Amino acid sequence: MISIAEINILRKFEDRQLIDDKIVRQMTKLHSLWFKGLQL
């Protein structure tokens, strides 16, 4: 899982849009895991 600190560090060194895409993918994964967990 990516932390806020990691996001901030990566944003300094990588293209902003690439990082935002990574964050969106991570959040999507977390949301699907969360909702799957609620349904079980």
Image (cartoon, rainbow, N blue to C red):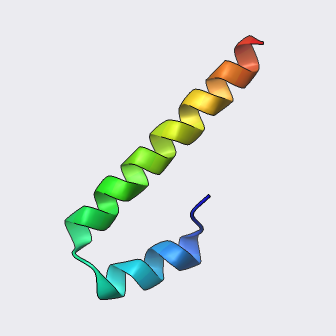
Q: Is residue 2 above or below residue 28?
A: below
Classify the position of the N terminus by image quarter: bottom right
**How far across and down, in percent of the image, does residue 35 sit?**
63, 23
**Point 56% across, 28% down: residue:** 32
Locate residue 40 relative to residue 28 in the image: left or right.
right
Of all residues, the one furthest to the top in this rendering is 39
Res. 39 image quadrant: top right
Q: Residue furthest right?
A: 40
The residue sitting at 56% across, 71% down in the picture is 4
Q: Please, is residue 3 above or below residue 26 in the view?
A: below
Q: Where does the image place residue 12, in percent across and percent down from the top left? A: 34, 87
Q: Quadrant of residue 2?
A: bottom right
* Residue 37 % position (x, y): 73, 23
Count of number-bearing discs: 0
Instruction: Look at 74% across and 19% down and name the residue there.
Output: 38
- Residue 6 drawn above or below residue 26: below
Task: Reply above or below: 30 against 40.
Answer: below
Side of 20 where 27 appears, left or right: right
Image quarter where the C terminus lies is top right
